[in-house]
Amino acid sequence: MGIVTPGFQGRRRTTQPALPPGQYLVEDFPVLSAGPTPRVDLDHWEFVIATETGAEHRWTWPQLMALPSEDPTVDIHCVTRWSKLGTTWRGVSLDTLLADVETTADYALVRSYGGYTTNLPLADLRDGQAWIAYRFDGADLAPEHGGPARMIVPHLYFWKSAKWVRGMRLLREDEPGFWETAGYHDYGDPWREQRYQGD
């Protein structure tokens, strides 16, 4: 008598080179959130970049929509080990939003509606590496996936791609965010499996 049900093979662990170590592919789009899903009224939505000197740069929803958009197709990797390849988004590059922001800061603390925060090196938000995305797979971004707008930083674990984004504070010193304070890695490179502090 076998010890497993005939045909059961467990979760297949792929060796596909496009995946970081420890990840498996999904075809759906899992929803993982800490806390309730914020419902953000576009009439009151804003994105604010506050510099280390206190200067603020603000965009309303119509102003964001008026900026040049990009359509990145990127792979995304969640720290819970699922990866989704070839996701398609539309959004505004952080290069566009930071173009007229005078700063000598090295870090950013990204803030979301609902109170979530996450920290990133500012260099990881420049040079075509990050977007404020408002469409996914040809449709408006659904609230459960961070709509109306979320950060997309695909080269880092997906908890760095803050849902319901509302702004960021530029800092000279790094300051951990929500999950980083709870023990997650400050940087979160999926190719180096930087899941937790000390990885």
Image (cartoon, rainbow, N blue to C red):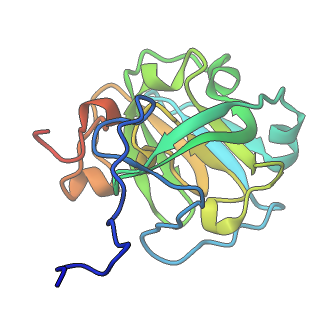
Which of the 4 image quadrants contains residue 57? top right
Number of numbered callouts drawn: 0
Residue furthest bottom as drawn: 1
> Could you tell me which residue is drawn at 62 percent across and 22 percent down?
98
Image quarter where the N terminus lies is: bottom left
Viewer-closest of 34 and 83: 83
Viewer-closest of 167 and 33: 33
> Could you tell me which residue is drawn at 19 percent across and 47 percent down?
196
Give percent across and percent down for residue 29: 58, 60
> Could you tell me which residue is drawn at 51 percent across and 26 percent down?
125
> Vertical placement of 9 versus 53: above or below?
below
Which of the 4 image quadrants contains residue 45? bottom right
Viewer-closest of 83 and 140: 83
Which of the 4 image quadrants contains residue 4? bottom left
Answer with left or right where residue 199 lies relative to residue 79: left
Residue furthest left as drawn: 198
Give percent across and percent down for residue 139: 83, 54
Answer with left or right where residue 19 lies relative to residue 27: left
> Could you tell me which residue is drawn at 53 percent across and 64 percent down?
30
Image quarter where the C terminus lies is: top left
Give percent across and percent down for residue 39: 68, 72
Answer with left or right where residue 139 lies relative to residue 23: right
Give percent across and percent down for residue 121: 38, 27
